[in-house]
Amino acid sequence: MNYQEQELQQLQEALYATLSEVDRICRKHGIRYFVTGGTAVGAYFWQKILPWDDDVDIGMMRPDYERFAEVAAKELGERFFLQTPDTEPHTPFFFMKVRMNGSRFSESTFRHIKMHQGIFVDIFPFDKIPRQRWLESLQYTLFQTLNGLFIATEIWQWKHCGKCDIPEPRKRGWLPCLMTRLLITVLPKRFIYYIMYRVQTMFNGCRLDEVKNIVTKSEHLPIEDIKAAQTVTLGPLQVKAPHDLLLYLTNHYGTVRKDVPDEMKVSHRPEELVFPKVKNEE
């Protein structure tokens, strides 16, 4: 389903408010962050959230990511909640989300999970990657395997070896499903998360000059581009972006352009969308 114009506008206003709170905390504590993904595309071409987009993505290098997790629990106002595997045991996400209290953004894939499902800003950790592409590929493959197990502890996405939790089962053979079922039965979710962390950070102690969101194949950028981050306009906000924003976008997407075809304008349109009540409505 598509959004109604007023509905999407109200949603994006809530996203700006959530990002503004994240930005406030980062500025107060000297935490570096930068817009990523579709949010970076919006900042580069539109100077706002993409006209059809319904989420915001930012990244942080691992030390900043951990620092934000440490201070945000105390710093976030009563309007927001920091969702991590530590604060939300049933989350299927290895990364942080800042969610807006009193709202609901319930996607069909996650609707049955007993967790905070408010409107959110995604925060991804960026870790160092090796110069050897085969080693980077191995790190990516290991992490993807572990992330699949982590998600499977909360959502079963296939027709074999369990009841499927999503409307349309994903294609997967019986044997891989059985192996996943056996592994998540034997391995505690916290242990899987710990091994994921070790894989993500395995090169952080090395003298390397690039970092990447390990869950992706190509979302990498030079550390110096983060240290020399620029300020860009995103709607009503002034936010941080990699110094060479076009380089980041080219690394991540291959090619980028403003005139995106309609079939590529993808959103997360939820089954249920609820906005927080304003005080004069209560």
Image (cartoon, rainbow, N blue to C red):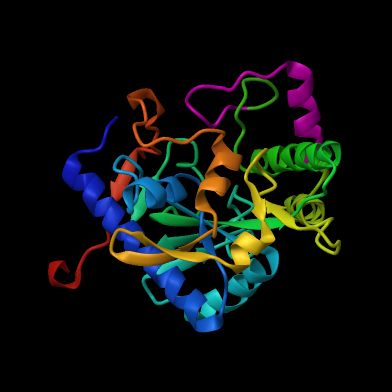
Total residue callouts = 0
Which residue, as the protein is rendered here, is positioned at the far left? 280
Residue at image point 45% right, 57% down: 121
For residue 261, what is the image quadrant? top left
Give whichever of 137, 47 is nearer the camera.
Answer: 47
| Nearer to me, 234 or 85 | 234
Q: In which quarter of the image is residue 226?
A: bottom right
Question: Where are the magenta residues, as a range?
Answer: 163-184
Q: Position of residue 195 (x, y in %)?
A: 81, 52
Residue displayed at 62% across by 68% down:
227
Q: Is residue 190 highlighted in magenta? A: no
**Residue 176 within the segment the image draws in magenta:** yes
Q: Is residue 102 visible?
A: no
User: Which percent across, then down, holds residue 262?
Assistant: 33, 26
Residue 29, relative to residue 39: is it above or below?
below
Horizontal relation, residue 14 to residue 55: left or right: left
Q: Which residue is drawn at 47% across and 25% down?
A: 167
Res. 146 visible in picture: yes
Residue 105 drawn at (x, y percent):
37, 48
Quarter of the image containing the N terminus? top left
Q: Is residue 240 above or below residue 78?
A: above
Left or right of 36? Residue 62 is right
Give the left or right position of residue 20, taking residue 180 as reference.
left
Which residue corresponds to the image point at 82% horizontal and 47% vertical from the top-left?
Answer: 131
Q: Where 237 falls versus 257 (above or below)? A: below
Occupied quadrant, residue 53: top left
Quadrant, the C terminus? bottom left
In the rendered view, does 109 fall on the left or right side of 268? right
